[in-house]
Amino acid sequence: MSAMLARGVIGTIVMLVAAAGAYGGQEIRATVTGRVTDQQGAVLPGVTMTATDVDTNGSLETVTDANGGYTISQLQPGPYKVTAALQGFKTFIREGVTLHTAETAKVDIQLSLGALEETITVVASLSAIETNQSTLAQTMENKRVSELPLNGRQVYQLLQLTAGTQFTQTTFGSTGFSGTRAWDTTGNISIQGSRTGNNEFLIDGASNAATGGWQYAPPVDAIQEFKVQTASVDASYGRTSGGVVNMTLRSGTNAFHGSTFTFYRGNALDANSTQNNRNSIPNTDHRFVDAGGVLGGPIRHDRTFFMGAYQGFNENIPFPRTSTVPSDLQRLGDFSQTFNSAGQLITIYDPLTTRPDPSRPGRFLRDPFPGNRIPAGRLDPVALALLKFIPSANVAGEAFTQANNLAASPNLGLYRYNSYLGRIDHVFSDRHRVFVTNSGNWGVEFRNQNGFPIPSLRGNWPKHRNHYLAAVDDVYAMTPTTLANVRVSFDRFNDFNPITYAALTGDLGITTPFQSVAPQYPYVTIDGFQDFFPGTFMRSLNNIVSVQSSLSKTRGSHFIKLGGDIRTYLLDRVSLGDANGRFDFNRGFTQRDPQSGDPVSGNGFASFLLGYPSGGGVDINAASSRRYPYYALFVQDDWKPSGRLTVNLGLRWDYQSPVTEAENLTTVGFDPSAPNPFQVPGLALRGGLLFAGVNGNRNRPYNPDYRNFQPRAGASYRVRERIIARANYGRSYLPLTGSGAEGINQTGFSRRTSIISSVQTGIPFNTLDRPYPEGLLEPFNSSLGLATNIGSGISFLNPDFKVPYADQWMAGVSLELPGKIGIDLAYVGNRSRRLPINGLAINEVPRSEREKAIEALGGNASYLSDLVPNPFAGLVPGTILNNPTVRRDQLLRPFPQFQGITMDRVNAGAAQYDGLEVSVNKRLSQGVVAVVTYTYSRQYEEGVNSAGATTTTTSPSTNAGYLSNGFDPTPWRSISGVDRPHRFTMTALYDLPIGHGRVIGRDLTGVVDKVVSGWQINVIGQVQSGTPTVAPNAVLLSPSAALPAGEQSLDRWFDNSTIANPRPDGTFAWAVLPPNAFRTLTVRLPDVRDPTAAQWAFSVFKNMSSGGRVSAQFRVEMFNAFNTPIYGAPDVGVNSPRFGRITPDQTNFPRQTQVGLRLVF
């Protein structure tokens, strides 16, 4: 599509939507459809059909067509009666028609001869399965939403009870994210293989997702229905590769209704965590109070209605944490008692003795410190100043290694949260209705992630989240067969953590100006030990302005809907990064061989005491204001060629504009052929970054993508009265704001001064007390043009990036059984393509040169690291290229003036999902409502990780997303990180049939009846496979790392044998990757899975009523009822003393019990 044509189409969308005046299209309302016949089965045209809302008396009407068919759309979910009237026939009224969110209900009617004034009233018995759509969906009505045992009363927990859906986050309690509080927001949801962050969340049709996750969770008592739509072919939905989470709020009625609630939870009702039990720490200090209410009613009878809700909670919750800190001897520089898990002494070597190894050409050796002790005179004074912020060990730790020797408990997290919600509905006439919603919340979290005291703690201390959402929705019946729906909404989400507690209060002795950039303590990481001190200020402000309109028309057997959609995403970001400095320490400077690690030498804390950082830096970062316009057109035709067959056809076109930065503070590409203005003798340097708006450059990092057409097709066929076959196919384009494509590159406007750890192999260059001897590198913005970041690494966005898409299809059958039981059995497929990969290396040393450093090929291991005269010496201060000598590999790069160069957002990633999904749904009857699901699925990925759409790790010898070197353009293929082959869920509410007039105790009365009646039992259960274990960064010599049945334990989760810790016969499974080798290792172990455990929640209610309009509900709810812990993943660091072992710390909450009182009136 040409740019001129595209602009014309976009202009048309704008005019269409502007003419309608507002936002709509993403359907939340229900539809009634059917056919009217006489007693002989002849179709009846011209019948007046009316659907009346029982609660408000509002109604919509239409007339049947020549084939007796009718469709009434745009109906608010709730209870209805459907009336059919035709002169010469008795008026027919079908009551008890309950319509659900985005549902098409079939109501066929047969009229009898007689006077119009005569009335026949029938109570409907609607099907327990969907009969008119080719999609899959799971609906949770208000009873289940408000009465299932939801931990923290967080409605989005219901997501994972839908077949094919799961939370992809595997740790909850220990991370502070529980998914259980209204405070929690996330996009870590996969629906039928979708990428996380790629699902749509709607509240009354208004978007509740800016960057791929929900931003607001309404109080459960204010929710009419909660619906998860999967494998959808409705063209009115876009920007999702998985599903649509559609939430409908309650509205006021002609009678006042409401509820109030109070819930309490405390440590006296809780079980203790495994880490607390192991360290003999009592369970204390947990307190949770959640209170609020909902009220709705009439403002003007039959015309104007209101609904309002409030929820507030306070929670103090322990986050007991076990971590590793230096032992008392280690703090003195004494490593004579430092052992690995096999009990072998770990020797500490002196990096200042690094020299060539005469017995191994190209390799190096070092001398150990005498007695394995660092002399006091070698201890760095800055390290000693920082050491006082590391707490001493308070428990014994593990045998040999002394790991996990600090137990922080209760380590309280504090949560304070308030929210409000309001809705007003007004009926102008039977043809015209409007509603307005307004909601907001504000919350704050204090959570210590490392268990250290202030100021060295890390975490959200505090973290603020504020949200505001407003929407106006208008429905107008232009004719009995034509309806217009318009909606406008504004959504604002502000997420920020100021981090003011770590202000620098003394001189650390670091001779660097970084303290003037951000006067806080620097972030410190030590390999094998707990990191400490915080990050820096961050703020993410998301604003979404949405305008959309739709027009629906019933024409014969066709129900046609068309519409347009305009949204503007305004995303402001401030992240100071490592503005207060970062220092990383690993074992590299104290291990025997600087080029290759081993399990019996080197220690990260020893490197720290010597003051020799392996990396780190200081950031001076620019803020950004990003803009994403979005436009769409769609047409949908639901066609009923016969009473048995329904065909759903749709076409959608999306245009997601490439991101722009409001002030052009971004790069827009890399020119590989342009001569660089920075030149040195002997080299013809070329290549450099391009900047937005400079020298005629565009203001967008990649080209527009106008060809995003999305065909949708599906059909459902009634094989028999209670058997429906259905199938569909649809293509959807992924949202740029959730597929890893919302970022920009601000190289030049932001700048990092990196620590130069070593110029000559193995010998420290900059030290902790002198990390930046030449000062900080100040941003040049765009003034240097192609010469920006000379001497440093750069990255840029793929200028040919295309919007990723997903093809989804399903085929299945639905059965209705007696007892209002519906069974859905379906095969679902999902193929995501063109997924963005970050980190394609384009400045790699040629393969022929790298092979000269591979010993297995006869090369010299030091060939690439040997120092040679540096043509850049003295010309690029503050970088590794400023020294008199430079590593040979730097001058062998295609663009030697730069270090690594990576291209991000390369459309080479892919994902695959195939699932067999079974859902059994029992609608409410005889006091029981239940849903049971089972999913058998397999998921694979190519070049992308399961936590999102991109991979970001890159280094000179690895290539993120690819087999790991810059010479292989094929992305790696692996089992997905969220692959769970088996997943079972169940929910049930059971009103025990005991008491007066019930099955048991039918004749009971008085006090006895009040005691034994009104009891209700509810349950939620989940059983699922574990996720695949991440593969170690080493070579697997055995066919499999899995252990034989019965040998797996927390101390040996997989075969962890190495040359230092072999099997009894001397063989071993893992070998360290040789220096300079091309990494072609697997990403995950396909036959080893991380721990999992069944999780069950139960509740018992006592419902009490005085016989009037007020009833009370006393509740006892128990979460993780059987107190089954879920542990984290095994340690996969091949040189780690805990390699292959799992620390028995719970990643889920132990059993928690809460009591509550709910009044309903």
Image: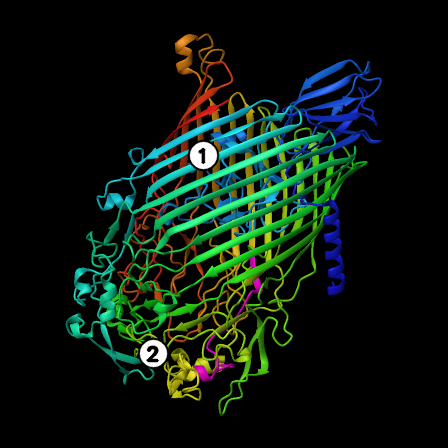
- Near-viewer residue (545 or 1060): 545
Query: In this image, 159 relative to 342: left or right?
Result: right
- Which image quarter holds the N terminus? bottom right
Query: In this image, 650 relative to 276: left or right?
Result: right
- Residues at marks 2 and 1, CA–CA distance in whole angstroms: 60 Å
Q: Position of residue 178 (x, y in %)?
A: 41, 44
Above/below status of 1041 relative to 183: below
Question: Crowding at label 1, few (<14), some or many (≥20) Cα neighbours within 10 Å?
Answer: many
SS under mark 1: strand
Q: Position of residue 87 (x, y in %)?
A: 84, 19
Above/below status of 315 relative to 510: above
The residue at the point 41 percent across, 79 percent down is: 879
The tag on residue 773 is 2
Question: Crowding at label 2, few (<14), some or many (≥20) Cα neighbours within 10 Å?
Answer: some
Looking at the image, tell me whether mark 2 or mark 1 is earlier in sequence order: 2
Query: In this image, 436 relative to 1085: left or right?
Result: right
Q: Position of residue 701 (x, y in %)?
A: 60, 67
Q: Can you name the residue that lies furthest to the left here?
A: 371
SS under mark 2: loop
Kind of residue indicated by mark 2? Pro
Task: Please report contact status of discs 2 and 1: CB closer than 8 Å, yes or no.
Answer: no
Chain part drawn in magenta: 890-911
Judging by the rendered image, the residue that carries numbered circle 1 is 1020
Query: In this image, 493 relative to 53: left or right?
Result: left
Q: Is residue 230 visible?
A: no
Q: Position of residue 786 (x, y in %)?
A: 55, 79
- In magenta segment, residue 904: yes
Q: Is residue 717 visible?
A: yes
Which corner quadrant of the image does residue 531 belong to?
A: bottom left
- Near-viewer residue (992 or 100): 100
Coloration mode: rainbow
Kind of residue indicated by mark 1? Ile
